[in-house]
Image (cartoon, rainbow, N blue to C red):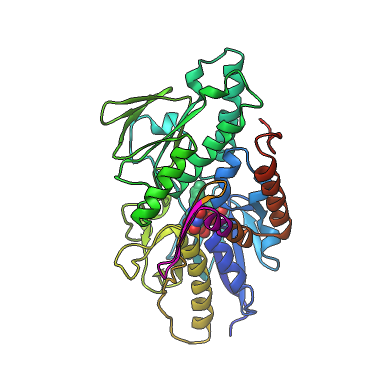
């Protein structure tokens, strides 16, 4: 076995880190991980940072600590040359590779809807979550001192998938808790969830969709389905039906796409995801995994852009690289569906397991809490998240929030 087979992994997210960790066990491989950030973001909990439930430190984990023994290079990859087998960083550094694993995730997609890019906040990064938190909290101060009208406390969330449902529920809970800090204006806090399709959580069963809707309504949110956004302005959202929703904060959770930087490397689908072979190879020695890859599942539809797919793809590619080095044949990737879940608020969630088992309410919420703690990287973060949750879920409403305006 060659002793210095250079594997470069671009992207230290769920897919890239899993792949690097597995490859690091192979003494015949030298692994370098490149990411623009020195930390991994635990995206499933971004909405809690955005709504003041968790500090950002809880959901970021240092890459260097996550993968001891692996070289980490902080940088933005701007070009990949599969023929020369090298890549270029934004600072003009050129790095050679024998095999490359592209795991650059996805970004928010506005689908060209007018005014979204300029006026709506998105939630793909820690900075974006901080921007949402800042806007939500600062608006209470501004309305309280008469600097902004009370309509500014209205929030519109667009997109009824798991992220939209989770952030809507958390905003509704935040607005409820504000009555202690801003008793004069808190009653004007209001959140509307807008979904273009006929129901929330379209990948879940109709029963779970209906449950999520009624739970959100119980929390005081207004849910509009069959309601497509036509355009957005600074302080309102215009629907295709002609209805106008005034808002001080607009959150766009209606779609994601892979970065368009790599589409010239192969054939990309409508969401810029690169169509990979069943082994997850794009061309010999160039692998694509996680949200950046497009591969059909057993139902003939592209696998969803979710963490379990990214984790399993990362593990699979590490095995393929090791297998090829010892002359073994490659195997196809087969996704093992682990089910899906979405939380709506305290003691409110929906969980659907592969065998048809469904959980709603407190059991679903406890399952959601437990799984998120297990998958968080790092003992410190786990302890810290559990401590924050215990505080929030026991004291929230009568005690101060964990985070402050920055
Ligand atoms: C708000 C939100 C909530 C979510 N909730 C859930 C959930 O509850 N359950 C679930 O299963 N999934 C959820 N997801 C989806 C899940 O986070 C993704 O499917 C998963 O992160 C994909 O893993 P990945 O490794 O492909 O990409 P990521 O984890 O996004 O990692 C990509 C990495 O690549 C780096 N990168 C990108 N481009 C470059 C470049 N040019 N140069 C250098 N580095 C680069 C990025 O900095 C990042 O670290 C959620 C996503 C979001 C945004």
Q: Which residues are magenta?
A: 349-368
The foreground one among 130 and 144 is 144
Residue at 43 percent across and 57 percent down: it is 305
Q: Is residue 91 visible?
A: no
Q: Quadrant of residue 192?
A: top left
Residue at 42 percent across and 43 percent down: it is 214
Spot the residue most to the left.
Answer: 241
The percent position of residue 362, horizontal first and vertical second, equals 55, 54
Residue at 30 percent across and 68 percent down: it is 299
Q: Is residue 241 visible?
A: yes
Quadrant location of the N terminus? bottom right
Q: Quadrant of residue 137?
A: top right
> Is 364 contained in the magenta span?
yes
The foreground one among 13 and 90 is 13
The percent position of residue 207, horizontal first and vertical second, equals 36, 54
Is residue 390 shown above or below 176?
Answer: below
* Image-based side of 215 in relation to 174, left or right: left
The percent position of residue 300, horizontal first and vertical second, equals 29, 67
* Image-based side of 96 in relation to 39, left or right: left
All told, the count of numbered labels is: 0
Quadrant location of the C terminus? top right
Q: Quadrant of residue 263?
A: bottom left
The percent position of residue 203, horizontal first and vertical second, equals 36, 56
The foreground one among 200 and 88 is 200
> Is 223 contained in the magenta span?
no
Spot the residue most to the bottom.
Answer: 327
């Amino acid at each position: 076995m060659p002793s210095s087979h250079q594997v470069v992994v671009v992207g230290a997210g769920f897919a890239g880190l899993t792949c690097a960790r597995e490859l690091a066990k192979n003494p015949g491989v030298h692994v370098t991980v490149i990411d623009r950030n020195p930390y991994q973001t635990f995206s499933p909990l971004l909405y809690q940072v955005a709504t003041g439930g968790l500090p950002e430190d809880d959901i970021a984990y240092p890459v260097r600590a996550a993968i001891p023994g692996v070289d980490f290079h902080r940088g933005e990859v701007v070009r990949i040359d599969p023929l020369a087998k090298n890549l270029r960083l934004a600072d003009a550094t050129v790095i050679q590779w024998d095999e490359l694993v592209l795991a650059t995730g996805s970004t928010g997609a506005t689908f060209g809807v007018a005014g979204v890019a300029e006026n709506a906040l998105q939630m793909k990064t820690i900075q974006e979550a901080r921007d949402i938190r800042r806007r939500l909290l600062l608006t209470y101060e501004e309305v309280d001192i008469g600097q902004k009208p009370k309509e500014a406390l209205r929030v519109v969330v667009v997109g009824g998938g798991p992220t939209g449902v989770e952030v809507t529920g958390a905003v509704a809970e935040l607005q409820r808790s504000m009555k202690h800090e801003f008793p004069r204006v808190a009653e004007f806090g209001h959140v509307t969830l807008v979904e273009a399709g006929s129901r929330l959580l379209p990948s879940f069963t109709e029963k779970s969709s209906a449950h999520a809707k009624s739970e959100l309504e119980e929390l005081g949110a207004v849910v509009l389905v069959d309601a497509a956004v036509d355009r957005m302005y600074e302080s309102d959202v215009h629907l295709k039906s002609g209805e106008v929703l005034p808002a001080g904060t607009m959150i766009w959770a209606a779609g994601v796409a892979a970065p368009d930087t790599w589409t010239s490397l192969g054939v990309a689908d409508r969401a810029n995801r690169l169509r990979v072979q069943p082994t997850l190879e794009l061309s010999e020695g160039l692998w694509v995994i996680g949200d950046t890859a497009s591969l059909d599942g057993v139902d003939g539809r592209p696998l969803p852009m979710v963490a379990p797919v990214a984790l399993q793809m990362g593990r699979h590619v590490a095995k393929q690289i090791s297998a090829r080095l010892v002359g073994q044949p490659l195997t196809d990737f087969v996704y093992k569906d682990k089910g899906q879940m979405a939380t709506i608020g305290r003691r409110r969630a929906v969980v659907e397991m592969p065998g048809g088992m469904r959980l709603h309410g407190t059991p679903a919420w406890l399952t959601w809490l437990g799984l998120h703690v297990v998958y968080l990287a790092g003992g410190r973060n786990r302890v810290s998240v559990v401590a924050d949750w215990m505080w929030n879920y026991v004291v929230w409403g009568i005690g101060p929030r964990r985070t402050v305006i920055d």
